Image: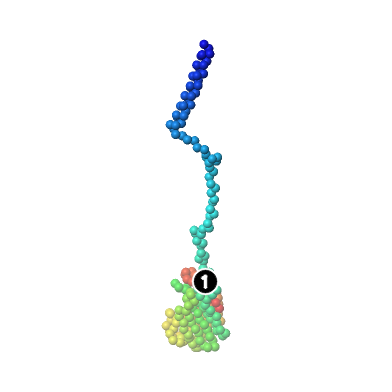
Amino acid sequence: MADTTAGTEKTMTTKITAAAAVLALSALALTGCVVENVPAGAQDPKPPATSTPSAAPTKSETPAEEDTSESIEDGGQDESKGETVDMGVEAGQVQYVRAIQNFSPTLERWLLDEEAGEVTYSIINCLGQPEAEGVATLEPAEGGEGTAYDATWIGKSPIESVAAKSVRLEITDDTLTNFSDVATSRTEIEVGNFSRMCVDAGETAADIVF
């Protein structure tokens, strides 16, 4: 009786195992899954090495700033100064100047030439340009003390406020007096005063040399 029971259990176990195998094959057929042989290393490929392209040289987006400062070339003129005016005198000549404070300053100049017996009168503006000029002959004035002269204009009087044909001048080594207007032979000091007047008036002062 015992042998019969043991044989029956063995037969049932074999059937169960076979049935399980059949079910597994059926499930595989239904899902259609196929396992392929994949070469080693293909499942996790390494990313290809990428080369970083060298940055091409580019032109600067901001152009180099140009030097806009103006340089004074040889022979050029500094805009802060006017033209150079030569007021030098020749041997035997003496000049007298007077700075006149007007709305636009001017420089009165008397150039005495004793040998020629003449005096040249001119009015010069801040730029060193003459605005009026005239020449007068000199004769000792009657009743004078040796310093008084009558200056007779050759042509029209260049003095704006004086229309007379002649004027009386008092001339010494240091001064030349026309009525109450006194010009001095200390030219550099008076021209310096004139230049300051021009600058104060907002004008360009000529560079006057002697």
**Quadrant showing the C terminus:** bottom right
The crowd level at tag 1 (other Cα within 10 Å; few <14, some 14-19, many 20+) is few
In front of the other: 125 or 62: 62
Residue 175 can be seen in this image: no
In front of the other: 15 or 159: 15
Q: Is residue 56 above or below residue 137?
A: above
- Identity of the amino acid at label 1? Asp
In front of the other: 133 or 138: 133
Q: Is residue 2 above or below residue 49?
A: above
Q: How is the image coloured?
A: rainbow
Q: Which residue is mark 1?
A: 78
Q: Position of residue 58 (x, y in %)?
A: 51, 58
Q: Position of residue 95 (x, y in %)?
A: 53, 81
Residue at figure coordinates x 53%, y 13% from the top left? 3
Furthest-left residue in view? Answer: 163
| Residue 164 falls left or right of residue 57 | left
Furthest-top residue in view? Answer: 1
Furthest-right residue in view? Answer: 91
Q: Is residue 37 above or below residue 71?
A: above
Residue at figure coordinates x 53%, y 46% from the top left? 48
Q: Position of residue 6 (x, y in %)?
A: 52, 15
Residue at figure coordinates x 54%, y 43% from the top left? 46
Question: Tag 1's secondary structure?
Answer: loop
Residue at figure coordinates x 51%, y 59% from the top left? 59
Q: Position of residue 50 (x, y in %)?
A: 53, 49
